[in-house]
Image (cartoon, rainbow, N blue to C red):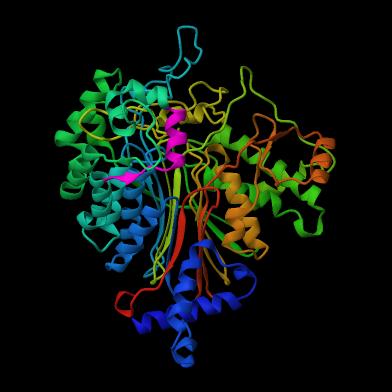
Amino acid sequence: MQNICASRATRNEAALRAGPLQKAPPRGLLVSWVFAVLCLVGMPLAAAEIRADASKPAAAAIASAHPLATEAGHRTLESGGNAFDAAVTVSAVLAVVEPYSSGLGGGGFWLLHRASDGLELMLDGRERAPLAAHRDMYLDGAGNPVSGRSIDGPLAAAIPGQPAALVHLARHYGRLPLEQSLAPAIRLARNGFAVDGHYLRMAQWRLDVLRKSPAAADQFLHANEVPAEGHLLRQPELADTLGALAKQGRKGFYAGPVAEKLVAGVRAAGGIWTLEDLRRYRVAERPPVRGSYRGMTITSAAPPSSGGIVLVEMLNVLAAFDLQSLSPEIRKHLLIEAMRRAYRDRAEYLGDPDFVDMPTPRLLHPFYGRGLARGIRLDRVTASRPPEGLAAGSAGRDTTHFSILDADGNRVAATLSINYPFGSGFVPPGTGVLLNDEMDDFSVRPGVPNVYGLIGGAANAIQPGKRMLSSMTPTFVESDRGVAILGTPGGSRIITMLLHAVLALAEGRGPEAWVEQPRFHHQYLPDEVEFEAGALSPAEMTSLKEKGHVLEPLNRPYGNMQAVYWDRRTGLVSAASDPRGIGTAEVISLPTSLR
């Protein structure tokens, strides 16, 4: 114990003295530093001067959107698991305690880096359209979208990918049995957890939809009403499904009794799933998107996520300008114009790579970004041209993210979703599995926005077995100085939040700044700049309006970024969780035997 205290004290004392990337103690480190001070009492000074080996992280770290998930991932690392085992644990616990954001009935992307050989890949656990899906399934006889059909109920649900992804992650990259990694989630589902204020707000928002599914109402409500804060939410049927997955692997979900209950429940309520849909589902390992900016390498999500391409394209546009030499008003104008152009390409070109040929090399090429930059005027906007029939859409809060670094340098950035809060609001009886409504992420009709206001074209049209386009953007940013692991929920705004964070990192600011800074966003259509309080000064607002920008202030913050940073110069690790959410970040000192 004394050695653990000594190493923790050394690292955290050094973090307090470190340079520009360690200006303020991240919230997730506060408890660790208090512990370090207590450990130092009565210890010889030499014990506090042990130097970390900068070739490896001095500690592990986890930042996630819920304290129970961070704690469970911590325990998995302490039990001898690596970052990939911890990712299984955190994913599964979030499925239990954040049913409004992710779950076994959803999917996501896990960006992986294996330290032993440098392997980097994106594990694609995105949902797939059922085999009976077709292009016009959400349109009426006149060809117009039917309100709510792609959002509420089992017809809105695609075939989930998260269960298969967790099995794949454990089998191919972890070192613990799946049963051990899933055990914390099973316990929480069976024994329950106390719901908080955020849970209540999300449940109230989707109350009518949850009430339409008797199994969902029994699971997430109390006497058919939103439960009181502190209510112990138990999910025994979800615990049983997690148990089947733990014991049988993918067969515990995609075949056998669980699969039969899923399909029977969906079809009885008007959905189109079949057992063949479940049998055919497979995760995919895809090469991540790569780019560079100011000496940093960007590694991010690949299609069917648009996140990496749009992020790199925006950075390539901005690389044509010396941002630091320009006034704040001009800098923000340039950011907005870069966002506008990249989101325009998102709508026109991007989709499932197994179905669509995309001009990916061109979109990622620095010359293409410079070409887009030439079309930007510093004195006025470039107006977005709406396709015929476009209506304004909305943006919402959904999805979840976590970032993990282990003491060997393995890392995971994972963004998971069931789309809209509480997904489709439907639970097939006897399963405890809340289904996604990811079918809304397809282009229901070209030029018509989804629930987040994003438009799409033929590249993202509905086809049987196809994966819908996503904005999820789990990302690594690497340079000689260090490695950042980050991502966030936030629907259509995810990618621009990552842009703000990467630019802050380029300026030498640390994880606290990435997660805390006020944000603004433009997504081509609607042609307006959404912004949080404090994101634009009065002078900036005046300047942007004079250039022709339409400004739309938001009445509440958005996003929930989770970030980890390893400073390669010192070996020190820091982590931060977005103050907009309830998550926690921990820097974890492990015994030498587990490092």
Asked whether residue 310 is in view, the answer is no
Verify whether residue 203 appears in magenta: yes
Q: Quadrant of the C terminus?
A: bottom left
Asked whether residue 391 is in view, the answer is yes
Verify whether residue 198 appears in magenta: yes
What count of labels does the image hold?
A: 0
Query: Which residue is found at the position 55% from the left and 46% from the top?
Result: 309
Query: Which residue is found at the position 65% from the left and 29% from the top?
Result: 526
Q: Is residue 267 left or right of residue 484?
A: left
Q: Is residue 416 left or right of residue 547?
A: left
Residue stretch in magenta: 192-206
Residue 484 horizontal/vertical position (percent): 53, 62
Is 144 situated above or below 476?
above
What is the chief secondary structure element of the magenta stretch?
Answer: helix
Q: Is residue 236 left or right of residue 6?
A: left
Q: Quadrant of the N terminus?
A: bottom left
Image-quadrant location for residue 325: bottom right
Q: Is residue 424 left or right of residue 261?
A: right
Query: Which residue is found at the position 25% from the left and 20% from the top?
Result: 267
Query: Who is closer to the viewer here, 372 or 81?
Result: 81
Residue 394 horizontal/vertical position (percent): 58, 28
Query: Which residue is found at the position 61% from the left and 17% from the top?
Result: 389
